[in-house]
């Protein structure tokens, strides 16, 4: 029975009513309860005093905000703007550029699919204060600017200070009778921010939880001397620097201490959070009902997105052995059954190898654990392959040499129950090459999970015109079951459908042309073929091969200016890592070629070269629907999968590409005759590596290639500094790991076929329809369904749950 209100309670109620200026207390109660409902965390029903405080504060704020706005209107007599333009508002939103190339964007697609498939999943990461830099092109050079994306706040995130967790660094290890202790550490706090991840029309909202670094209140204060107080407070920045900025390298490892701190930060905070949620288990429970962690793998799956969170393996061991006091054998069994590893690259310069000395200083206990993991691993391999000492050396987690290093990929493989590549060809390559020894020891561990993209963002949202034209023919269920796109094959000869698909593409091209004119002051011919290569700038992605084609086309037009050329607008975009000299020179070469080509009156609007500045998701959403030709031209065996390739295919562009990454499966799904495939295959590249690649022989044998290279080296594209591109020329001629010249001839021939087909719009569009119809496999819903069933031991649930205002 409720206790009667005391006079003091009544006074409290009256004071609340008076403060908020509320005449109707029942309205106040309704609003308070509504806020309390939305303040409550998902994993419990029991409100804390802080929850009550925020619910009351938000209730009062609601009443104040209306009056606040009205007051400003009264003062300044301005009405709020009506008839708001949705696109204008969308453009105000900042990109959350919290990753580099495809890796972070893939994770975002996966979060969308996990919510849409009803999987109870969290995405964990770091809330970088500064994401991937904004790129400015100044006089043809890339200039980086800080990405202050949180400048105006982020309305989608909610700070969760109640789940703040300590993360430890440095210190030393004590081996005592009670067990191992990691002592005298420096502590940084991890503050979580939650972002809702809505599923597609199923009322499910999952969580992305990003960690921000905070200095503890007593940071450096306990040992400051007289007069050191100000410096101690200023030094809080050192701790908070951990989540300050994203390292902007894509497919390149930089072994900096701050980066290792970041990697441990996200892992340590996340594992504490996972174990807290596992122990609490039940919604509405504040008690720890599960104290036995032996069932962790039955309830929790941890997918390591590349080696960046590899420290989850020794960190989980540390928690289980040092804190929970499990035996090594029991702990290791839990770790391996819980963790799985996705590999995203085979480039040796991208693989993480951390110096042992750095670990010894920063994470001394983890180093001990890694040594013990390796000792047991070496013991097992020694028994499997007796006397094979070279195999032991190759498979060790510790690489000997001038500087002893920890191979993080090896740690991930040994500590996981499943290892996968991200396209069929890539998963075969890792078994045949980089991880061959591990495959021979544990063949059942290795799987393939071909990447995918979410059709919600990459079709319905970015290309509503095409989504509608498709829905008119096959209904809209394809949005959650992309395999249904194959039903479009029934319409491949339907003149009305062909016309509709072509019309949507033309409208998208007109719109993108207007965007370029408005924002970049460049005028392009919307009837030209939009030939697009957008991705990070890297030698292996071979933007240089694209450059050689542009120069060849330019030379041909100059030679025969009266011929009927297929007009092209070549657009290249992407960021170069700030320290990657060659990539920055590639950008300068592209812009320099554009300066000559775009200002040559003989060429006119038959060939234009545009550098798309600051390529990012919001620009991708504009350019991809407007593209005719998608350039996917990496050296066979170097691009693990690619996902941009899938986005172009789904949006009605045709692909010119090598048999690399997911291109192989795209050709299989759409029919190889419906892609422009060229160049060496993986076995050809391997044979050339064994025989030796001789760039000069191609240069001497192919006149158009020689002409293009001579123009670059002779200063045609850099008249004021003729030797500007010496480094690029020298690389291509003498030490090109990615064999640009070897594929030049096949590429040019293939591009001629592209130009010829573009002159026949009906046949071009029919090929486009074959491509769209073959896209079903490349939905991230399919990818995630396979992860769920084959790695995580879960089953997707397509049920719609009741909305908050529906009865349960």
Image (tube, rainbow, N blue to C red):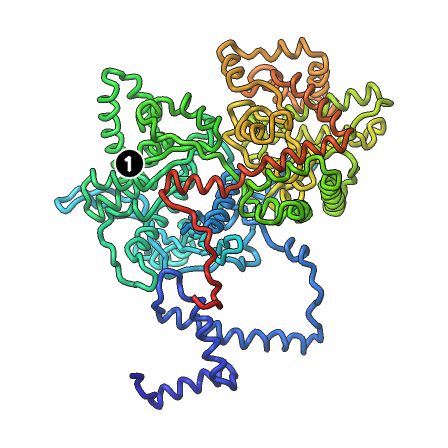
Front residue (pair 487, 299): 487
Front residue (pair 365, 648): 648
Question: Residue 794's spot in the image, x, y percent?
Answer: 38, 45
Q: In which quarter of the image is the C terminus?
A: bottom left
Question: Which residue is found at the position 46% from the left and 62% from the top?
Answer: 802
Q: Is residue 172 rendered to the left or right of residue 215? A: left
Rate crowding at label 1 as few (under 14), some (14 to 19) or many (20 or more) other CA atoms within 10 Å: some
Looking at the image, can residue 721 be seen?
Answer: no
Question: Residue 271's spot in the image, x, y percent?
Answer: 33, 48
Residue that badge 1 annotates: 367
Looking at the image, can residue 461 be seen?
Answer: yes
Q: In which quarter of the image is residue 80?
A: bottom right
**Relative to 55, is 108 above or below?**
above
Question: Which residue is found at the position 64% from the left and 23% from the top?
Answer: 545
View extreme (right): residue: 562
Q: In which quarter of the image is the N terminus?
A: bottom left
């Amino acid at each position: 029975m409720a206790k009667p209100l005391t006079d003091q309670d009544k006074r409290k109620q009256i004071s609340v009513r008076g403060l908020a200026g509320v005449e109707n207390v029942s309205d106040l109660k309704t609003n308070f309860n509504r806020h309390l409902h939305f303040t409550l965390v998902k994993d419990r029903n029991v409100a804390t005093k802080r929850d009550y405080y925020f619910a009351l504060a938000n209730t009062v704020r609601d009443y104040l905000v209306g009056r606040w706005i009205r007051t400003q209107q009264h003062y300044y007599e301005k009405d709020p703007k009506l008839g708001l333009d949705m696109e204008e508002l969308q453009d105000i939103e900042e990109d959350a550029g919290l990753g580099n190339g495809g890796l972070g964007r893939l994770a975002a697609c996966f979060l969308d699919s996990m919510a849409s498939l009803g999987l109870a999943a969290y995405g964990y990461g770091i809330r970088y204060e500064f994401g991937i830099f904004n790129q400015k092109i100044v006089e043809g050079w890339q200039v980086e600017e800080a990405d202050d994306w949180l400048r105006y706040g982020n309305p989608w995130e909610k700070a969760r200070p109640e789940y703040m967790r300590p993360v430890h660094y440095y210190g030393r290890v004590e081996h005592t009778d009670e067990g191992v202790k990691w002592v005298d550490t420096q502590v940084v706090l991890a503050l979580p921010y939650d972002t809702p991840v809505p599923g597609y029309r199923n009322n499910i909202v999952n969580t992305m939880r990003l960690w921000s670094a905070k200095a503890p209140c007593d940071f450096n204060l306990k040992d400051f001397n007289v007069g050191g107080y100000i410096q101690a407070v200023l030094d809080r920045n050192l701790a908070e620097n951990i989540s300050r900025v994203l390292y902007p390298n894509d497919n390149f490892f930089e072994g900096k201490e701050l980066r290792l701190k970041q990697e441990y930060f996200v892992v340590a905070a996340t594992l504490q959070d996972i174990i807290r949620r596992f122990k609490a288990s039940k919604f509405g429970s504040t008690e720890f009902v599960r104290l036995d962690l032996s069932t962790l793998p039955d309830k929790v799956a941890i997918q390591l997105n590349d080696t960046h969170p590899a420290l989850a393996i020794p960190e989980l061991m540390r928690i289980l052995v040092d804190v929970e006091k499990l035996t090594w054998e029991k702990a290791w069994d839990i770790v391996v059954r819980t963790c799985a590893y996705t590999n995203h690259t085979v480039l040796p310069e991208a693989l993480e190898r951390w110096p042992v000395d750095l670990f010894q200083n920063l994470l001394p206990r983890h180093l001990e654990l890694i040594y013990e993991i390796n000792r047991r691993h070496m013991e097992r391999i020694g028994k499997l392959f007796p006397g094979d000492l070279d195999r032991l050396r190759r498979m060790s987690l510790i690489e000997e040499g001038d500087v002893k290093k920890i191979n993080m990929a090896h740690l991930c493989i040994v500590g996981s129950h499943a290892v996968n590549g991200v396209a069929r060809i890539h998963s075969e390559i890792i078994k045949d090459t980089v991880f061959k020894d591990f495959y021979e020891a544990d063949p059942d561990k290795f799987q393939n999970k071909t990447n995918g993209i979410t059709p919600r963002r990459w079709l319905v949202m970015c290309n509503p015109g095409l989504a509608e034209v498709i829905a008119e023919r096959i209904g809209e269920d394809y949005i959650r079951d992309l395999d249904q796109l194959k039903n479009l094959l029934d319409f491949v000869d339907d003149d009305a459908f062909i016309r509709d698909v072509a019309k949507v593409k033309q409208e998208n091209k007109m719109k993108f042309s207007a965007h370029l004119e408005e924002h970049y002051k460049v005028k392009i011919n919307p009837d030209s073929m939009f030939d697009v290569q957008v991705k990070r700038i890297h030698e292996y992605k071979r933007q240089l091969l694209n450059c050689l084609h542009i120069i060849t086309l330019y030379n041909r037009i100059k030679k025969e200016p009266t011929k009927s050329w297929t007009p092209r607008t070549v657009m290249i975009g992407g960021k170069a890592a700030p320290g990657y000299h060659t990539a920055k020179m590639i950008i300068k070469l592209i812009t320099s070629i554009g300066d000559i080509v775009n200002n040559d009156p003989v060429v006119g609007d038959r060939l234009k070269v545009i550098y798309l500045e600051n390529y990012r998701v919001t620009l991708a959403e504009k350019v991809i629907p407007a593209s005719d030709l998608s350039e996917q031209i990496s050296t066979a065996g170097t691009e693990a999968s690619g996902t941009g390739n899938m986005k172009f295919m789904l949006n009605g562009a045709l692909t010119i590409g090598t048999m690399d990454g997911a291109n192989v499966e795209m050709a299989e799904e759409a029919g190889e005759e419906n892609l422009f495939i060229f160049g060496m295959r993986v076995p050809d590249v391997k044979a050339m590596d064994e025989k030796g690649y001789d760039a000069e022989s191609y240069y001497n044998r192919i006149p158009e290639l020689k002409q293009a290279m001579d123009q670059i080296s002779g200063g045609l594209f850099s008249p004021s500094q003729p030797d500007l591109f010496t480094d690029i020329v020298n690389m291509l001629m003498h030490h090109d790991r990615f064999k640009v010249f070897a594929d030049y001839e096949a590429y040019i021939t293939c591009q001629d076929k592209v130009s010829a087909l573009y002159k026949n719009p009906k046949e071009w569009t029919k090929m486009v329809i074959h491509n769209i119809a073959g896209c079903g496999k490349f939905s991230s819903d399919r990818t995630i369904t396979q992860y769920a069933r084959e790695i995580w031991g879960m089953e997707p649930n397509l049920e719609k749950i009741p909305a908050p205002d529906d009865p349960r």
